[in-house]
Structure formats: structure tokens, C-alpha cells
Image (cartoon, rainbow, N blue to C red):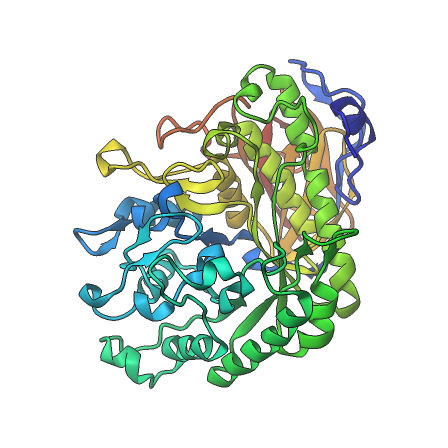
Amino acid sequence: MNINRRTFIKSATIAGAGLATHPDLSARSVVVKAKQGIEIDPAPLFALSPYLYMQFMEPLGRTDGSVEAAWDFNEQAWREDVVEATRDLAPSMVRFGGIFSSYYRWREGVGKRSSRTPMQNLLWGGYESNQVGTAEFVDFCRQVRADPLMCVNFESEGNPGWSIDGMGSDRRGTAREAAEWVDYCNNPDNALRKAHGIDDPLRIPFWQIGNETSYAKERFHRDIAVRKTIAFSKEMLRADPSIKLIGWGGLQRWGDGEETFWAKDMIERAGEHLDYVAFHHMFNPYRREQDHPLKGIDYRKDPARTWDYLMNACAFHEKKVLSMREQVEPYQMPMALTECHYSFPGRNRNEVMSTWATGVSYARIANLHERHGDLLKIATLADFCGTRWQVNALMIPIPRSYGEAFLMPVAKVMKLYRKYSGTDYCETTQTPAYLDVTASRKGNTLFVHVVNTHRSSPVKTNLSLKGATIVSIKVHEMAADPEFEVIAREPDPLQIQTKAAPVDGTWTFPAASVSAVEIRIQ
């Protein structure tokens, strides 16, 4: 069904989103004095996973230098500026794989470098040198203090186009091959790894079976995918019973009739072997609209209209999350959103992604993920690193003399939330207009994430707690012109500014800002 902008903005409501409805998104320069304050109940409701701030690394061939752009071939090491920027981002987990996993054979990327076999990147084009393989990926994760998540080749997802490459090489990975990969990484006594000069285990605790099995008619049907998931799980768990396994439960995009998820069948039949079910969401909320500002460079023509669209985009994402929840909630199976980002049409996945307006929009999605954190336990908002795609969290100038790696607006938001978040979710019982608010707690510290969705007006409000006394308040905030575009490490107005706030909770949140309010309580 087509839906125009006016109809959408008037009708869109976000279940449990914590953003009060308001009729006016017009630009104003005066401070908006909220008619009601922010009220938080500091009693913990459920645990929040640290893996809501993961990153996703995939070799993207000719379309984007990606992983190999981050590798210094002269030094045979990761680029120092990439490691430095990633430490600043502080991801809790990094996933390796994606579609690339559907034709990746892990043995080609281990052992002596001069003996590694280059591989054709069947979807993204070009060849990968395989100088970055299992050990190098784990080394990167260790340097940036992130847990590794590996995506295994699931018999090429049943896709004939990924089964044999242009040179006639069989690219299908079997359950036995996946289990041997687990053993190579995690078994302290694995002979092959030791022969490669790596005495200690590489230790990868999380493994995803396949990538997006349901996304095309050429891939496995649901029944075959479930049966093969069971077979892979059993083999991999024999190699290491302690690993955490993720099976595919995402949307079926092909076939007649209504689109459906696989999660229910996957859980009922294979759930005893799995710890999570995965789904993905790379989305353009307005793809059915002919006249929307988020295509090409149209976003520059009417910044206010662009802002309206971006602020309302999370409603579409919540619809996807709620559909997945409906599948998993009866079983209380945790969800893993191992790929997620906007996908607006345009050059390099659209330059609007480099704007601070998009960063603020992503903050709304981060809040949404927190609200569903009782079941959503792994999530991301971006691809990880690359040389040109605007959906990446981290951009890498090529050649190195052109500059140092830098964080995109989405990464700035993820950095803020990762640094200032609690371990348990708390209920926001009252929210003023224009503000999107979530709260979490760690011990006697409460963290309140506040997104000011007003493009040009600060919002003055008061923050109060139920049944607790405030000892001190600090506000960690980022704010900039919504039209500011990040194209290099410097200049960088998106630095976190930390300010003391009065204990009565009175505060003015800047226009187009994302804040983490740190409250000490007793």
C-alpha cells in the first residue's frame, strides 16, 4: 500500500516508543518548555545485553575495500588508525561473515600466508587474498576488546550460484567442515592450529549457522533449512558444547501469499540446539513512495522535510521487531539482529547517512532496541568498516596518506550508548513531547538516554525518579547542526560534552541532540 508523507506523519504511532505524539514538527528557535517531565521508575525490569552494540564485518570485494582496506599488507598487521578508531567505538562484539560466508572456505584463510589461496568473491566481485582469516579476525577482536562471532558456510545456503565459482571450485561448506572450524579455534589441543604456530586456542564463543537462508527462492526451503540447522548444530556442539549457536529465523521474502518468518518452525524443531534466532533488517521505510527526500541527494533540498522522515523511520523498524517478537515470545528464545541499517537509494548507499540527522534517527532505533531488550540480546545499527559505503560505522581513507579512519554519525551514537548504559532496563513512566527516552541501571547509577527529535528547538524539562533520591547528575550529550556531514576525522563537532546538572533534575536538551544522563541515586 502506498503511503504519502502527510498521511504517514499523521498516522504513525510507535508502540511503547516513549515519544509523546505532537502535531508540530515545524522549525522553531525558541526553547520548548515541556508540559510534563521525564519520570523514571528505577526498579530493574530485565537484563540488558552488552551485545546490543555489536558490529558486523564482511569482506565486500570490489564494491568496498572493507576488511582488506583495514589491513596493512607491508606490516602484515591491522592498520593502527583502524584499531584506534575501533577502540574508541568500543563494540561489544564483532561478527565476521555475512553473504560472504556462503562461499567462504575457512581453511583457505589459515596457516602460512604465502600458502593461502585467494578466493573469488562471488557476490561482491573481485578476489580476496585471504591474508585476513580466522586468526587475524580474532586478533583484531582481542585488540579492540570485543567478543568474536563467526558466521559459517551453510552449504552455500542452497544457492547454486554460490556453490561453484568461476574456476570450478566447490564453495559449499558442510556440517563437518563447520565443526572442524570450531575445533580449530576452541580445542586447546587442535593439531592443525598448533602446526600453524598458534599454541593457545583462538576461542570464538558465538557461531551463526548461515546468513540469510530465506531471502531468495534459489536457497533452502524452510524444511530443508531446519533439518540442516539441526545437523550443523549437532556436529558443532560435539566439537565444543560450550559455544552459543544462532540459527536463522528471519523473514521469508519469496513465494506466494503473505510474507512470513521462519523463527517459529526453527525454534520448535531445532530450538533445543540453539541459543538465539537471527533476523536482519536493511531497510528503506519509504521505498513505496515516489516523492521522498531520502533518495540520491534530495535530502539536501529540504532539510526540514528530510528530518521529519528520518525521525519517523523507526516506526517501520519497530514493526519488523514486533513481528519477530510475535514468533519468539511464546518460547522466550533470544533474538539476534546481526545485520541492521538504513538502505536508502543513492551513490554509496546515500550520503544522507553521513549527516547528523541520520545519527539522531539511529539513536531512536537504539532506544527501540533497549525497549525490546528482554528478548533482543544481539543487535547492531551499521555495517562495520569500509572505504565508501555510508552504512558503515567506520570509514577508512585510501590511501593512508589521505587521512585516518573515522567514526560515522551512527558510530558516534553507538559509542555514547555503549559507554553510558546500565545492565538492567528501567521503565520510563512519563515522557515529554519531542523527547524519546529510555532508562537503564547499574548498581546505584541510572542512565537515561534522551533523543531530542525537535530539529531546531531545545526542550526544557524536569527529570524525576519514583522512590529514589538523586545524589548527582551528569549529562553526556552530542549535538550539532542536523545537516552537518561527517567526511573526515576532523573537524569533529560530534564530541561528547559532559556537564553537571542540578539535582532537581531541571535540564534543557539541545535541539537535534542525543544525550546520556548519568544519575547517582540512593
Residue 139 in view here: yes
Q: Is residue 147 visible?
A: no
Instruction: Report how many numbered discs are placed on residues in the image.
Output: 0
Q: Residue visible at 64% across and 54% down?
A: 441
Q: Is residue 468 above or below residue 176?
A: above
In this view, the residue in front, 470 or 339, is 339
Q: Could you say where residue 217 lies in the image, as x and y percent from the top left? A: 63, 56
Say which quarter of the image contains residue 406.
top left
Left or right: residue 516 compared with residue 196: right
Which residue is at 46% across, 75% downward?
A: 178
At 45% across and 71% down in the image, what residue appears?
Answer: 173
Image position of 521 (left or right of 268) = left
360 or 416: nearer the viewer: 360
**Residue 417: percent from the left, percent from the top?**
55, 46
Between residue 129 and residue 492, name the one nearer to us.
129
Q: Is residue 286 above or below residue 266?
A: above
In this view of the protein, which residue sits in the foreground, 112 or 477? 112
Residue 329, position as x, y percentages in the image = 77, 63
Residue pictured at 22% horizontal, 76% vertical:
197
**Image quarter in which the N terminus is found:** top right
Question: In the image, residue 352 lies at what x, y percent?
Answer: 52, 28
